[in-house]
Amino acid sequence: MATAKELLAQKLKQNTQKHQLAQKDNIKELKEFRRNVPIEDISRSPYQPRKKFDEQEIKELAESIDEVGLLQPITVRKLENFKFELIAGERRLRAHEVLKKSTIEAIIIDASDEEASLLTLAENLKRQDLTDFEIYIGLSGLDENLKKNKQRLAKSLGLNREDMYKYLSFEKLPEVILNDLVDQPQLLGRTAATAFKKFLADHEDIIQRAEVALLDAWAKVKQGQLEQTKAVAQATKYLDQNNTESPSTSLVKKIEHAGKVAGNIKYNDKLLKVSLKIAHMDEASLEKLENLLKEFIVKNNEV
């Protein structure tokens, strides 16, 4: 899979060649590669991860464009009926709307839904003020085919695989937290989200009480009374103070390899956990392990 930057460059090159070939027959087609497009014909991208825009920043950008002009065209893709869909340049488009302009200079490319979603997210990842939750929104909105191979997707977007999984940790959080983040996406970063996810997974046998504990800590985070990085410790303390049940007996078996402890298996009457010490695991090995665990679950459910 090519990187998003390479993909965009490739698409622009393909369009340039196509229009150059058509120049003798249709000069209008050549001009459509880069031209002024009616703003009313441009629809917003459904793959836009950013849900909140700073109106003051848009106003300042509009003033700059009014003074010196648009320095970089927006990028759109062709739709049916001579309409277009925005790929890159949401702020520039909004600034033109503030100025009540009827057209905006645009680079027009041909792109499938998959390519458009990838390019839109890649463009937004360049922006330093995009929150981790908004990046998760962008990732979750990608086509399922793109998300199957997370290692290749991460490489395409210029991310490492570890960060990719951290962003995706948001999807395992309680709906209450996700709803709060829609309005205030800056409240929780990917590292803390990963800790939240792990806390819930570690207490899967008492998941309802674990969620209550986490939401209690989350309420303090929202109110500014607790740092997001300390929420899990607060939730753990809450659980310990309100634990009225006797813990189930847990058994631990060591996983040894080459004379060294490579991990352990911990289980009780409700839950089994496997921990492995690894320096690196590629996508193929990860899928193999996942399939093995699925086979184990199916086999034991049949017993």
Image (tube, helix red, strand yellow):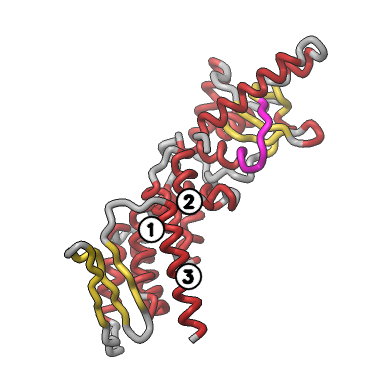
- Which of disc 2 and disc 1 is earlier in sequence? 2
Query: In the image, which residues are magenta?
Result: 108-116
- Which of disc 3 and disc 1 is earlier in sequence? 1
Residue 109 highlighted magenta (yes or no): yes
Q: Residue furthest left?
A: 259
Instruction: Label 1: state its secondary structure.
Output: helix
Residue 132 highlighted magenta (yes or no): no
Q: Are marks 1 and 2 in contact (CB under 8 Å)?
A: yes
The image shows residue 296 at horizontal and vertical percentages of 44, 74
Q: Which residue is mark 1?
A: 193
Q: Which residue is mark 2?
A: 136
At label 1, which amino acid type do we have? Ala
Q: Can you see residue 34?
A: no
The residues bearing labels 2 and 3 have C-alpha atoms spaced at a distance of 26 Å
Q: Residue furthest top?
A: 24
At label 2, which amino acid type do we have? Tyr
Q: Quadrant of residue 115?
A: top right
Badge 3: residue crowd in 10 Å (few <14, some 14–19, many ≥20): few
- Which of disc 3 and disc 2 is earlier in sequence? 2
The image shows residue 56 at horizontal and vertical percentages of 49, 35
